[in-house]
Image (cartoon, rainbow, N blue to C red):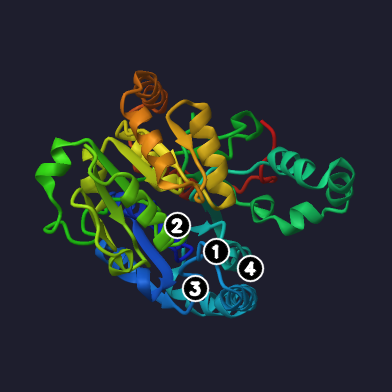
């Protein structure tokens, strides 16, 4: 029996894909330890992990239209997140003897994870909850944003590698929660990278299912709107969609998260809003999905053959949305778009057979393997290997 220590980054998008992986390892008789902050501890305990709770500061939401005060708070939070790393590393080392892990699995965003593992000499696997970034991808992005001259200087001075978390990854194994068919610039990665995704967690327990009009949802067509908890949506965003679909053939189900549905006022009869919706129950019954296009939600829709309306805000969301649009399985529009654009996009996707065909092709290329089993296989192979490779570089061209 091998011993694994998971060091996740405490956000839903980072935690959710790890739950099926730790569950698979435990089912195979392995011992799994997790160090995570309190809000996510219970999910790992329910999966059968031995959990140590840490005090970790992370953002809970990025307001769509932040006030000056909110911007100030986010800057202060960013400083606090950097300053907390030595404390967390020290706390991990205090517990190390009780864990004695054969392999440490550290989220790339949990910067304390790799640092703690390196100081102990433990075998290290990294985890990327979205698509991976190679050095070539980072260089190309820098050239577009800063120009070739600045990029050349940054590269020669080694500053890109020092500043970019993905390029600091020295793990022997890199698990990526993305199918190879969706990973941008797949050819720029070596065999250290395992594109095992999508690792999808059952979220049917989120929110209440009893208040939803299942007969109307099943009858369709149904539009499911779920921009998530971190990047969320404003009252204007939800109200605009509600008004645009009022009185239409569509049933609209909106997960508003940090927005109280009462802020939206009286809604049309065919529109339902609740803070939290059991996504794995509603999404398979939906005809179109409005999402920020985080990797977990995007892949959950793709594997179920649901076309996407992508409304990205974060950098990785924009890249995922662009990749899925390139593959022909969705449409990207801006958060500032009025409700009429969402209505037009939904109507277009509903009757577009080419999108359905593209979804079928993408699913065929992804295959029907068990991502959690593939990831567990890779970790068990690492745990069973007696010698450490002499060289492991992030994003080395294959």
Residue 114, x across and y down, in percent:
59, 62
Q: Tags 2 and 3 in contact by the CB under 8 Å rule?
A: no
- Whole-number angstrom distance, CA of label 2 to CA of label 3: 23 Å
Label 1 crowding class (10 Å Cα cut-off): few <14, some 14-19, many 20+? some
In the picture, residue 220 is in which quadrant? Answer: top left
Q: Where does the image place residue 142, in percent across and percent down from the top left?
A: 76, 45
Determine whether the residue tagged by mark 4 lies in a helix, strand or loop: helix
Separation of marks 4 and 1 at Cα, in angstroms? 15 Å
- Asked whether disc 1 touches disc 2, contact meaning CB atoms under 8 Å apart, the reply is yes
Q: Going 50% across and 45% down the picture, which residue do you hit?
A: 175
Q: Mark 4 points at which residue?
A: 119
Left or right of 306 in this view: 207: left
Q: Position of residue 46 (x, y in %)?
A: 25, 64
Residue 110, numbered label? 1
Q: Which type of secondary structure does the marked residue at label 3 adopt? A: helix
Q: Give the numbered dot on residue 14.
A: 2
Lower position in the chain sequence, tag 2 or tag 3: 2
Quarter of the rendering containing residue 193: top right
Return the residue at label 3. 96
């Amino acid at each position: 029996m091998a011993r694994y220590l998971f060091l996740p980054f405490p956000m839903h998008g980072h935690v959710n894909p790890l739950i099926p992986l730790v569950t698979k390892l435990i089912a195979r008789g392995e011992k799994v330890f997790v160090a995570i902050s309190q809000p996510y501890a219970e999910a790992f305990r329910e999966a059968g992990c031995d959990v140590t709770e840490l005090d970790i500061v992370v953002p809970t939401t990025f307001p769509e239209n932040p006030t000056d005060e909110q911007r100030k708070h986010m800057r202060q939070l960013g400083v606090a997140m950097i300053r907390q790393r030595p404390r967390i590393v020290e706390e991990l080392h205090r517990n190390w003897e009780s864990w004695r892990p054969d392999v440490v699995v550290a989220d790339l965003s949990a910067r304390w994870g790799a640092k703690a593992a390196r100081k102990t000499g433990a075998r290290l696997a990294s985890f990327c909850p979205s698509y991976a970034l190679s050095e070539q991808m980072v260089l190309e992005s820098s050239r577009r944003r800063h120009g070739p001259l600045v990029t050349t200087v940054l590269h020669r001075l080694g500053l890109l590698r020092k500043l970019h978390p993905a390029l600091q990854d020295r793990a022997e194994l890199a698990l990526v929660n993305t199918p190879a068919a969706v990973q941008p610039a797949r050819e720029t990665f070596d065999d250290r990278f395992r594109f095992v995704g999508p690792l999808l967690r059952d979220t049917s327990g989120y929110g209440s299912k009893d208040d939803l009009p299942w007969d109307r949802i099943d009858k369709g067509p149904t539009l499911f709107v779920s921009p998530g908890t971190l990047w969320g949506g404003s009252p204007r965003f939800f109200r605009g969609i509600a008004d645009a679909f009022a009185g239409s053939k569509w049933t609209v189900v909106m997960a508003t998260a940090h927005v109280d549905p009462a802020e939206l006022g009286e809604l049309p009869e065919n529109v339902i809003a609740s803070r939290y919706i059991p996504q794995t129950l509603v999404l398979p019954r939906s005809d179109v999905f409005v999402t920020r296009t985080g990797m977990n939600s995007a892949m959950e829709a793709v594997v179920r053959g649901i076309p996407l309306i992508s409304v990205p805000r974060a950098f990785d969301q924009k890249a995922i949305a662009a990749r899925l649009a390139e593959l022909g399985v969705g449409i990207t529009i801006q958060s500032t778009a009025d409700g009429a654009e969402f209505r037009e996009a939904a109507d277009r996707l509903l009757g577009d057979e080419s999108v359905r065909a593209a979804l079928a092709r993408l699913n065929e290329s992804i295959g029907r393997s068990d991502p959690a089993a593939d990831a567990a296989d890779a970790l068990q192979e690492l745990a069973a290997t007696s010698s450490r490779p002499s060289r492991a570089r992030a994003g080395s061209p294959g």
